[in-house]
């Protein structure tokens, strides 16, 4: 009996042009490429995507790019040059999706706005990611994830009560916007299946993170309630915090469910607190977080991390060790899921990085290769487009490649 032929990845046949730089737009394209889309990364000939030089490098090769550029063919093209404009319009005629994050009006300045792109390909979906959206009083401001984290209210509620607002030490707003844009692309493609026509996606970095923050606008609208900074505590439940163990480690405890809160109190030897009237609701427990934190923290402080985690698991209470990346790489659950997988790379050899975002039982995604060198596929992509060697040489002489 022969083994069944693996089914193609679900986005096989989809072609994406990634014109974006740094994180949100390129991440959206990466997510599409992970599930089979052909992604052509288009970078400026003399100014590569800055993510190639962000963070640590090895042997002169940026490591962040290896993750963000995976499953992408890399080409160079100066869109502001006449030959670059013409070539992009030809590429657009072969594509399903373009992802870009220039400031509003930049593509239009180059003669590559929506009228020109949709004329070249009426079925094209154009995903535009900016800091503030395509219109409004701040639309033309430079926009970065840090600004979105500040403007959305995220920083205002993050940090200790008497301390300053705290920004995340990673690209949180960009990551949320990248995930959102990948979802938006699939939504627009579903609409195209019905209408036969593409459309423009307008993603503003300041919006997806605001949705992720939950009901804060609703709370303010109805109650004029402004959530304060509470450190690791939640205004809605308790106990909920990080606690230091006897061996100097830390664990996180959550009691979002009432039954779990009761199990925790029995485990730490304070069952009498369950009978308190305020214990019956999450907000009541949150108002008495000092009492609950003292009870839980004192019990945990007398035990090692392994003892704490084992006891909580036996009691069916929610706990997790606070892990750094070293712990993550060795975590048995992550190993079972192959969350951190190994990719062979011609430049650096075996690389371990995050696997595709989710598992599909019948048509799974895969990492076919890590991020490739700047412009590695330029000639091949243009030859497939029908350009001759002479035409490619002319574009290179013009500075368009």
Image: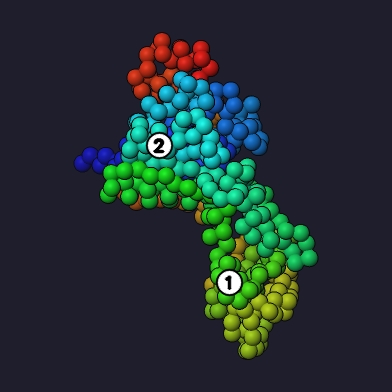
Q: Is residue 162 visible?
A: yes
The residue located at (51%, 41%) in the rendering is 25
Image height of 235 relative to 125, above or below: below
- Give the residue pinned by disc 2: 115
Position of 224 compared to 211: left or right?
right
The residue sitting at 58% across, 67% down in the picture is 217
Task: Using residue 361 as the reference point, say whether residue 273 is left or right of it.
Answer: right
* Residue furthest top in the image: 390
Q: Nearer the viewer, residue 269 or 120?
A: 120
Q: Nearer the viewer, residue 392 or 236?
A: 392
Question: Which quarter of the image is occupied by the N terminus?
Answer: top left
Give the secondary structure at mark 2.
helix
For residue 200, the mark is none
Nearer the camera: disc 1 or disc 2: 2
Q: Examine the image and state in which quarter residue 219 appears.
A: bottom right
Q: Nearer the viewer, residue 64 or 93?
A: 93
- Residue 152, given in percent of the width and then of the height, sits at 61, 57
- The residues tagged by marks 1 and 2 sit, at their Cα atoms, a distance apart of 40 Å
Q: Which residue is mark 1?
A: 221
- Which sits earlier in the primary sequence, circle 1 or circle 2? 2
Left/right of residue 347 with respect to residue 194 in the rendered view: right
**Residue 356 point in image, percent of width and height:** 46, 45
Q: Would you call the spot at circle 2 few (<14 residues within 10 Å), some (14-19), or many (20 or more)?
A: few
Query: Mark 1 Cα within 10 Å, few/some/many (few <14, many 20+)?
Result: few
Residue at horizontal 64%, vertical 55%? 151
Outermost residue toward the left in this view: 1
Q: How many marks?
A: 2
Residue shown at 43%/19% (left/top)? 379
């Amino acid at each position: 009996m022969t083994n069944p032929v693996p089914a193609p990845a679900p986005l096989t046949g989809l072609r994406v042009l990634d014109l974006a730089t740094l994180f949100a737009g390129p991440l959206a394209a990466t997510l599409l490429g992970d599930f089979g889309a052909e992604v052509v990364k288009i970078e400026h000939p003399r100014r590569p995507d800055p993510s190639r030089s962000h963070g640590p490098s090895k042997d002169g090769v940026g490591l962040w790019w290896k993750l963000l550029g995976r499953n992408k063919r890399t080409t160079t093209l100066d869109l502001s040059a006449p030959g670059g404009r013409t070539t992009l319009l030809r590429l657009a005629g072969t594509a399903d999706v373009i992802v870009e994050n220039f400031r509003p009006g930049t593509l239009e300045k180059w003669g590559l706005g929506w009228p020109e792109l949709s004329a070249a390909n009426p079925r094209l979906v154009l995903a535009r990611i900016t800091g503030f959206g395509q219109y409004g009083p701040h639309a033309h401001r430079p926009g970065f994830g840090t600004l979105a984290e500040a403007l959305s209210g995220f920083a205002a509620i993050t940090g200790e009560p008497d301390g300053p607002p705290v920004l995340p030490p990673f690209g949180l707003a960009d990551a949320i916007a990248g995930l959102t844009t990948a979802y938006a692309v699939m939504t627009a493609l579903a609409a195209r299946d019905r209408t036969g026509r593409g459309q423009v996606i307008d993603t503003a970095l300041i919006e997806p993170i605001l949705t992720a923050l939950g009901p804060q606008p609703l709370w303010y609208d109805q109650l004029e309630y402004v959530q304060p900074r509470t450190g690791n505590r939640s205004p809605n439940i308790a106990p909920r915090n990080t606690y230091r163990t006897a061996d100097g480690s830390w664990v996180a405890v959550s009691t979002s469910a009432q039954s779990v809160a009761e199990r925790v109190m029995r485990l730490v030897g304070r069952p009498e607190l369950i009978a308190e009237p305020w214990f019956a609701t999450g907000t009541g427990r949150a108002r008495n977080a000092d009492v609950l934190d003292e009870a839980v923290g004192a019990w945990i402080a007398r035990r090692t991390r392994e003892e704490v985690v084992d006891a909580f698991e036996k009691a069916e209470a929610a706990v997790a060790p606070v892990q750094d990346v070293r712990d993550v790489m060795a975590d048995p659950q992550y190993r079972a899921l192959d969350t951190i997988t190994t990719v062979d790379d011609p430049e650096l050899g075996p690389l371990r990085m995050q696997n595709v975002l989710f598992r599909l039982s019948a048509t799974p995604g895969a990492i076919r290769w890590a991020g490739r060198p700047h412009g590695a596929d330029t000639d091949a992509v243009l030859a497939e487009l029908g350009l001759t060697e002479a035409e490619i040489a002319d574009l290179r002489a013009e500075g368009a490649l």
